[in-house]
Amino acid sequence: MTQPPNQPPQGGFGAPQDQPPQDQPPQPQQPQPQPAPPQQPPQAPAPQGGFGAPQTPPPPQGPPPGAPQPGYGYPQQPPAAPQSGPYGQQGPYGQPQPGPYGQQGPYGQPQQPGPYGQPQQPGPYGQPQGYGYPAQPQFPGAPGTPPPGSGNRFKGKTAIVIGAAVAALLVIGGTVFAVTSGGDDGDDKKPVAEKSDDSKPTTSESPVNPGDGSGAGGEDPENLNEGRQAGESKVLWYKEAPDAPGDGADAAGMWITDKTAVKSAYKQVVAYNVGDGKPTWAPITFPQKICAVTSQKTSDDKIVVAYMNGTTDRAKCNLLQQIDLNTGDKGWTAKVGDGELFDSALQVELSVSGDTLMVGRSQSGTAYDVRTGKKLFDKKRYGESCFPTAFSGGARLVAVASCDAAGTNEHDEVQELDPKTGKAKWTQKFDKGWRVSRVYSADPLVVYSTNDDKKSWNISAFTAAGKFRSQVGFDEDFAPNCGLAIIARDLQGCEGVAADADTLYLPTEATSGPNEIVAINLSTGKEKWRVKSPTDESMVPIKVEGGKLIAYVEPSYSAGGRIVSILTGGGSHTPAKLLQNPQGTAQIESGFYSKDVDWVGGRFYLSTTRLSGNEDTKEKLMLAYGK
């Protein structure tokens, strides 16, 4: 099925205000005089589809449970009359700035301040960026107005959702009311780690999903390599999905080790040998659906999944299970308690940074030692009514807080936390109306934020000390696949974006013909180079390894997808083919409802992240290619 169109990065630029390490937020900025909003051409409707959208999508049986309703994070309706666009409005940083050399920006529009609460200085160059875009002031500074007819610049793939802290509250006349319900299991304030109880998640004695062709999730009986042409890769193995309810189910998470490819699907975690697809251990079946997973694995190949404690609308996503990816052994378990008033574990998010597992609730988080399940610390409300609502793991543990949501100084803040103590290493404040939606990279830290009212976006890079480094300095329709977030902000939920120490790699929107991957200098925010897809299908980054960007070129009806490498340094950036998937399985490859992809050890792995629950067709779970 085609993904609903999400929102892509858009304008609204500027340098953040550097702040000292602290747990307290900086003092509010004084309001700045606002100019009258200039005009911009009418917005165009957002295009449909995106990364991973199948060519012949199966119709779903219903929307994903808890999926966000149209509103914040969905395409806006085109205005009836021309309105101020992302570059023709007061920017996110509080005060309009002159263009380069003290002049107004292109088309007579004022330059934009950034989202961090500090006015910006004019940039030094102001030269045209090429590709038909107007002259842009460089950084620190802000972009000019997009060229006429650029359409709706606040469209595309990046899903933006309302954070649970906001969604869980209703403000009427300055009074805050809860709109969430309690749990099924009474008082569960304190998280408790304990040994695994086999009466909870079970390792099937008679596997429902053995992966050997004898049950749901088994191999396809036909020979998928029949008719394979010279130079095409081989289908190493292909698995069908287990049964899912008619309204669909999540299948988030895919983890590849030296031995095992592991996948979650609805109530199960299944594992296959990376080479031949035979089961490496019996599936683990949970009593209720899996509701969150750690997208990262630990250095010793462990993950943690969360599953529901019941089936009613009061059930919580509060039961944790550690799993060894190589053996299937179940480690520690824990029950996540609710936080303070209105701080619910109805939905949680999981992230791993080093040996720390961070469990995010609607308004706080609890950290555990991922090896033992021992509680390390709580990240609670602080300062000016700042509630931590989302976390991101990896090389850095990052927290995003929503502050003063019911007051006049509403804003977001980003902090890097010490993963052992929870102490904030630094804090960066965003201006009112700006929402931190994604972390594109943990190291270097690259943050994507949006302003719904201004229909603007910002991508900023930070130093290790949390100081402003750069931001993307040109207008583009970027299109990473950020999937469907449900309740909490999924900071780490984007595929199709990669970074190394100095460069961010983003795919552009495919409009007509091939799309491109753009390499962006993280020291300047400028474009370093771009390269077109070698086919008419979209090309998206997977990862950077060995000085090369690994990218996936999506399949068409007449050709399988391919894996390519692109030199990241000097020299030619022409994509070099690493793997050409067979034409005979192109429709299977393109038919995944939504995709998670990886390239490990010379093998390409492809899996679905959502099951539609359609009983009339065999649903696909996972596919592996190699030579």
Image: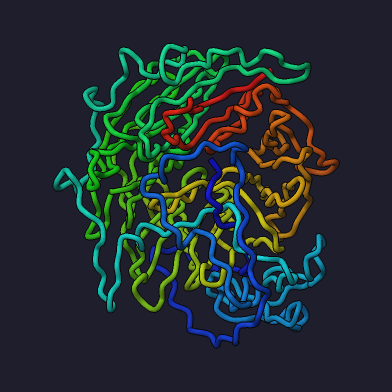
- Quadrant containing the C terminus is top right
At horizontal 30% and vertical 64% (from top left) the residue drawn is 169
Q: Nearer the viewer, residue 316 or 443?
A: 316
Measured as percent of width and height from the top left, residue 445 is found at: 57, 52
Q: Is residue 32 above or below residue 21?
A: below
Q: Is residue 478 above or below residue 302?
A: below
Relative to 449, 82 lies left or right: right
Measured as percent of width and height from the top left, residue 351 is found at: 42, 43
Q: Quadrant of residue 288?
A: top left
At horizontal 20% and vertical 52% (from top left) the residue drawn is 182
Relative to 462, 577 lies left or right: right
Measured as percent of width and height from the top left, residue 248 is found at: 40, 38
Measured as percent of width and height from the top left, residue 50 is found at: 61, 46
Q: Residue furthest front?
A: 616
Relative to 452, 586 lies left or right: right
Q: Residue furthest right?
A: 571
At horizontal 49% and vertical 39% (from top left) the residue drawn is 59
At horizontal 71% and vertical 14% (from top left) the residue drawn is 227
Q: Nearer the viewer, residue 614 or 387?
A: 614
Q: Quadrant of residue 40?
A: bottom right
Q: Is residue 155 above or below residue 62?
A: below
